[in-house]
Image (spheres, rainbow, N blue to C red):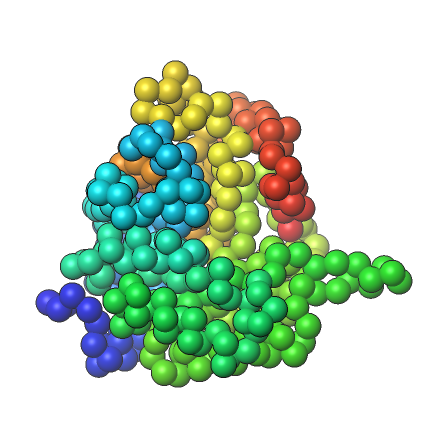
Amino acid sequence: MTQQRMTRREFVRDTAAGAAALAAGLSLVRVGNADAADTSKILNYNPDMEYRLCGKTGWMVSAVCLGGHWKRIVQIIGGQGIGDYGGNIARPDFQKNRYEVVTRCIERGINYIDACTHDETQAYSQALKGRRDKMYLGWSWYENESRRADRRTPEALVPTLEEGMRQAKEEYVDLWRITCNVDGSRAPDGKYVMTHTPAESEGIAAALDKAKKSGKARKTGVSSHDRVWLSYMIEKFPDQIDAVVTPYTAKTKVLEKDSFFDIVRKCNCGFFGIKPFASGSAFKGDSSPNSPQREEDDRIARLAIRYILCNPAITAPIPGMISVQQVDNVALAVKERRELDKQEKAELDRAMDRAWANLPGHYQWLKEWEYV
């Protein structure tokens, strides 16, 4: 593609290509097995990266992707927090860092970025300028989406998408995945109450449908921590829920019976896993380049990625990476032997036990994702 941005004709062409890949049964391209699929249909293909079918989207997505958050980035560029963490995303050193990290992702064959805040959508749109065709862009402006009670209808949600796109100078987004309420609850009689009512859920799905039909969003989905509600949405609105974004850590285990992934597989839904390192709690160091724990933390990160990718229902974990070195490290994990041996499993178990013990109060909910 010679133009910076995708035209509507190219949009239709690439969507059709994705559907053809799905129909052909293309599901996984492993390192060293490039002949198993027509790699010309894989966005930003690199033979050293593994690619997985992202459910009914038809996209072949890199087995590890770039999450939107950039926590601890001050350890790389200095100064104060950035964006939602207290700083200014217009800082030249911040923009340079994001450009370099995205560049290395492209070089390593990573082809999806997940942005879920206003600052993230604006920062990554800027970092992708001139190379938008190299990455699928997942999009959410969570501050103005369905965690707000007045943002659960098409009339409220679609203008939020349009305004964010206008500010970022985007003509389309690849995956609009509305950020929704987090957890369900229990009624006095013990009955489970989903995080959104059926009426609210209908409104959210209708907004996704409108954006998809207008061409503003190529594919659509939702993000929540409520597995009951996510299961409801995946089954109730199969044409609107192409993918979900939700937690999956290196301590998560798939239930043998009545697993959430039974629904994911049955409905051919894409799955992006946030918080693979339990928001950094698995690490001993502070992520600075000169941290004395860097080598050990890098090894833990690779073990975590390998463990998570043993679940074939997962499209990709999406760690927020703050340096070129971290991109190189997760790309290396994809190339390493997948199954953990006894010693590696014990090392990862120790790290995740430490993570569970060190989780800050506002991340205690991650413990609800140990068995899914």
Residue 86 position within the rendered picture, expressed as x and y whole percent measured from the top left: 42, 42
Q: Is residue 142 visible?
A: yes
Split into 4 quadrants, where in the image is the N terminus? bottom left
Q: Is residue 22 visible?
A: no
Residue at 58%, 31% in the rendered image: 355
Residue at 40%, 58% in the rendered image: 118
Q: Could you tell whether 349 is left or right of 1 in the image?
A: right
Q: Could you tell whether 365 is left or right of 284 in the image?
A: right
Residue extending furthest right?
189
Q: Could you tell whether 100 is left or right of 317 in the image?
A: left
Residue at 24%, 39% in the rendered image: 93
Residue 172 position within the rendered picture, expressed as x and y whole percent measured from the top left: 30, 71
Q: Could you tell whether 258 is left or right of 175 in the image?
A: right
Residue at 64%, 28% in the rendered image: 357
The picture quadrant where one finds residue 293 is top left
Residue extending furthest left?
2
Residue 15 position within the rendered picture, expressed as x and y whole percent measured from the top left: 31, 75
The picture quadrant where one finds residue 264 is bottom right
Q: Nearer the viewer, residue 49 or 132?
A: 132
Q: Is residue 369 above or below residue 333?
A: below
Q: Nearer the viewer, residue 155 or 314?
A: 155
Q: Nearer the viewer, residue 326 or 77?
A: 77
Question: How many marks are shown on the rendered structure?
Answer: 0
Residue 31 position within the rendered picture, expressed as x and y whole percent measured from the top left: 31, 45
The picture quadrant where one finds residue 134 is bottom left
